[in-house]
């Protein structure tokens, strides 16, 4: 089970997530997010992380050339793409999609990407709203999916049992304030996710 902690904004949270067993950390480069991190600040965190932890850059409606520039500058492992923009070739892409009641797993066939991050609709916030969606809608997907949206230690095992995802991703429900992780909540989530997976 690939377990990702998203919305990392500081080194203490990053290292605590790694210590707790996170396989991937997410850095949000969208200025409209309360978890936005500047590229220079992200660079100072990324350089302290073990090579086996995936560094994921989150981009919203960003131009492909800007995605490539930041990905290469920080040696990111994955670009997580939100919105309608394209992305550069030759980079591992996770496409983020909001799951509405009309969602069907076959919708994923339209994209040639490594994985899909499935989240609850969040309107202008574009994610990070802390609300789950109906995980049954993601069950049976033939593509790699990463479940996101309202996950924490109390519900991640049920989410995994229901949807059988490739990975899970948590952010806002693990925070003491936007952009600041509660290390106890984060540790409990990581433990519950690993055990369920």
Image: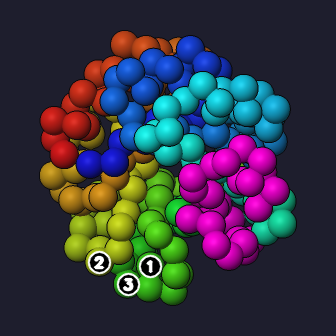
Is residue 179 something one can see in this rendering?
no
Residue 83 on the magenta span: yes
Q: What element carries label 1?
A: helix
Q: Is mark 2 on a helix, strand or loop?
A: loop
Q: Seen in the image, is 31 located left or right of residue 191?
A: right
Looking at the rendered structure, which numbered label has been put on residue 121?
Answer: none
Residue at the image position 64 percent from the left and 39 percent from the top? 27
Residue 195, x across and y down, in percent: 16, 35
Within-10-Å neighbours for mark 3: few <14, some 14–19, many 20+ = few
Q: Considering depth in this image, is 35 or 88 the residue closer to the camera? A: 88
Is residue 36 something one can see in this rendering?
yes
Residue 28, x across and y down, in percent: 67, 42
- Label 1 vs label 3: CA separation? 5 Å
* Mark 3 lies on residue: 106
**Callouts 1 and 3 close, C-beta under 8 Å:** yes
Q: Seen in the image, is 159 located left or right of residue 74?
A: left
* Mark 1 lies on residue: 108
Residue 147 lies, with reference to residue 38, above or below; the image says below
- Indicate the quadrant where residue 16 lies: top left
* Mark 2 lies on residue: 142
Q: Seen in the image, is 181 located left or right of residue 28?
A: left
Residue 44 lies, with reference to residue 23, above or below; the image says above
| Residues in magenta, as a range | 68-92
Label 2 vs label 3, nearer the camera: 2
- Label 2 vs label 1: CA separation? 9 Å
Residue 100 lies, with reference to residue 142, above or below; the image says above
**Callouts 2 and 3 close, C-beta under 8 Å:** no
Residue 28 on the magenta span: no
Q: What element carries label 3?
A: helix
**Callouts 2 and 1 close, C-beta under 8 Å:** yes
Residue 109, x across and y down, in percent: 44, 85
């Amino acid at each position: 089970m690939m377990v990702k902690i998203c919305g990392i904004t500081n080194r203490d949270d990053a290292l605590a997530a790694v210590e707790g067993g996170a396989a991937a950390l997410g850095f949000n480069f969208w200025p409209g997010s309360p978890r936005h991190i500047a590229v220079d600040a992200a660079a100072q965190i990324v350089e302290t992380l073990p090579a086996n932890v995936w560094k994921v850059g989150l981009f919203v409606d960003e131009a492909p050339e800007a995605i490539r520039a930041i990905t290469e500058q920080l040696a990111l492992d994955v670009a997580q793409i939100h919105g309608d923009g394209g992305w550069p070739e030759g980079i591992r892409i996770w496409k983020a999609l909001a799951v509405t009641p009309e969602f069907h797993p076959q919708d994923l066939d339209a994209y040639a990407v490594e994985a899909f991050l499935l989240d609850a609709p969040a309107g202008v916030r574009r994610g990070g709203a802390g609300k789950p969606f109906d995980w049954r809608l993601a069950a049976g997907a033939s593509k790699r999916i990463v479940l996101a949206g309202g996950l924490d230690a109390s519900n991640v095992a049920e989410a995994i049992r229901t949807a059988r995802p490739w990975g899970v991703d948590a952010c806002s429900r693990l925070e003491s304030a936007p952009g600041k992780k509660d290390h106890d909540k984060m540790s409990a989530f990581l433990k519950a996710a690993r055990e369920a997976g």
